[in-house]
Amino acid sequence: MDLRAVNASKLKMFRAAIEKQATDEIAEASKNIREKKSAAGKARAELAVREELSRIRAEQSSAEAKFKKEFSRCDFEIERAVRIHRKELIEGFFGEIEGELQKFADSAKYDDHLKSCIKKAENELGDSCVFLACPRDMEKLRTLTKKEIRADNSIKLGGICAIDEEKGLFADYTLDKALENEKSAFSNHAELRL
């Protein structure tokens, strides 16, 4: 449903109602003027009609401005509510994914994932790299590699980071970073924008 089209339709209805009311009031004013026909009365009547038309048009313009302002406010509130709801849905969705990643970190497949991360880090950074891991993965990593392993409390879900201090190189293979990247990419899809 296109809110602008709905609002435009409502604005047309209000404009038509105001114009009908204006037409009815003009007809009534014209009838009263005809009843008071006289040379002097006719001139005054024409002035009164013009003033009445000006008053009615001013009321019409004022009403249209109020309706436009109200429609704009409603559009803003609806868009804001949609954004808040969308954010809640995304947070819930990625909360579920985070739970699944935590289950994965506790499964047997996680060791294979760590092996693959270690191999990738060694290929990209070389043999002099040091691994950073969450404290709960320290023992697992010691069984998988002979390289230096340091605890990193910023890694919550799992995976490793690799650093080559001599060359100043860093690579992040954590589940935390993968989830963050997916969340960012998900929110940037054109289909999700208002």
Image (spheres, rainbow, N blue to C red):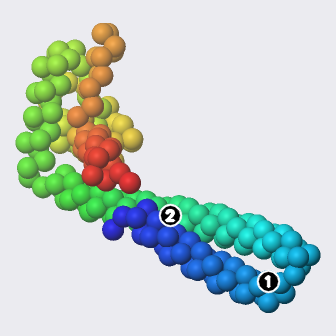
Q: 170 or 144: which is nearer to us?
A: 170
In the picture, measured across the screen, residue 170 lies left or right of residue 59, that is left
How packed mark 1 is, by other alpha carbons closer than 10 Å (few <14, some 14-19, many 20 or more), is some
Q: Dividing the picture into quarters, in which one does residue 115 lie?
A: top left
The circle on residue 134 is none
Could you tell which of marks 1 and 2 lies nearer the N-terminus? 1
Query: Hey, what amino acid is under mark 1?
Result: Ile
Residue 129 at least partly seen:
yes
| Percent coordinates x, y for residue 153 in the rendering | 39, 42
Q: Nearer the viewer, residue 114 or 174?
A: 174
Secondary structure category for the residue under label 2 = helix
Q: Give the label on residue 75, or none.
A: 2
Position in image of residue 5 (x %, y %): 40, 64
Rendered position, 180 above or below 83: above
Q: Seen in the image, is 99 located left or right of residue 112?
A: right
For label 1, the residue is 33
Q: Position of residue 102 (x, y in %)?
A: 24, 56
Disc 2 residue crowd, few under 14, some 14–19, many 20+, Cα 10 Å: some
Q: Percent position (x, y) of residue 186?
A: 28, 48
Q: Quadrant of the N terminus?
A: bottom left
Image quadrant in which the C terminus is located: bottom left
Which residue lies most toward the front here? 39
- Residue 58, relative to residue 150: is it above or below? below
> In screen coordinates, is 71 left or right of 156?
right
The structure residue drawn at horizontal position 67% and vertical position 65%, both measured from the top left corner, is 61
Label 1 sits on a secondary structure element that is helix
Q: How many marks?
A: 2
Residue nearer the viewer, 68 or 151: 68
Q: Residue at x 18, y 35 (%)?
A: 142
For the question of whether residue 84 can be seen, the reply is no
